[in-house]
Image (cartoon, grey):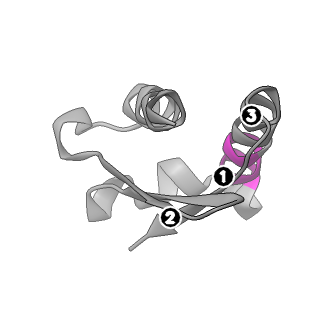
Amino acid sequence: MGEMNDLVLYMARALVDNPDQVEVTEIEGQQTSVIELKVAKEDLGKVIGKQGRTARAMRTILSAASTKIRKRASLEIIE
């Protein structure tokens, strides 16, 4: 499931001003994986977006990509 981590890392780094401070960790379960995204405090708004639209779009892309490997993945943005 490393490719899901790479996908989230790629999307987050493209959005933020401090791409070196982006951290992605994965908590893997039997059916579902939780991918945690941690960014710099000043970049948090860029990752979430207005009314959460950017975060929702990232979750949609992750969901579509995880369907391909037949495993659920959810994205958690850590403050």
Q: Quadrant of residue 20?
A: top left
Amino acid type of the residue that numbered disc 2 sits on in the rendered structure: Ile
Q: Secondary structure at mark 2?
A: strand
Which sits in the foreground, 45 or 37? 37
- The residue where tag 3 is placed is 61
Q: Is residue 46 magenta?
A: no
> Of residues 22 and 72, which is closer to you in this image?
72
Q: Position of residue 28 (x, y in %)?
A: 51, 59
Residue under the point 25% across and 34% down: 19
Per the model, the C-alpha gap separating discs 1 and 2 is: 8 Å
Chain-order first, disc 1 or disc 2: 1
How packed mark 2 is, by other alpha carbons closer than 10 Å (few <14, some 14-19, many 20 or more), is: some
Residue extent of the magenta highlight: 53-59
Res 58 quadrant in image = top right
Q: Which residue is rendered at x = 73% and y = 30% of the image? A: 69
Residue bearing mark 2: 77
Q: Amino acid at mark 1?
A: Ala
- Marks 2 and 3 sit apart, C-alpha to C-alpha, by 15 Å
Q: Residue at x 19, y 46 (%)?
A: 21
On residue 29, the disc is none
What's under tag 3, amino acid-wise?
Answer: Ile
Q: Please give the residue where the numbered disc 1 appears in the rendered image.
A: 55
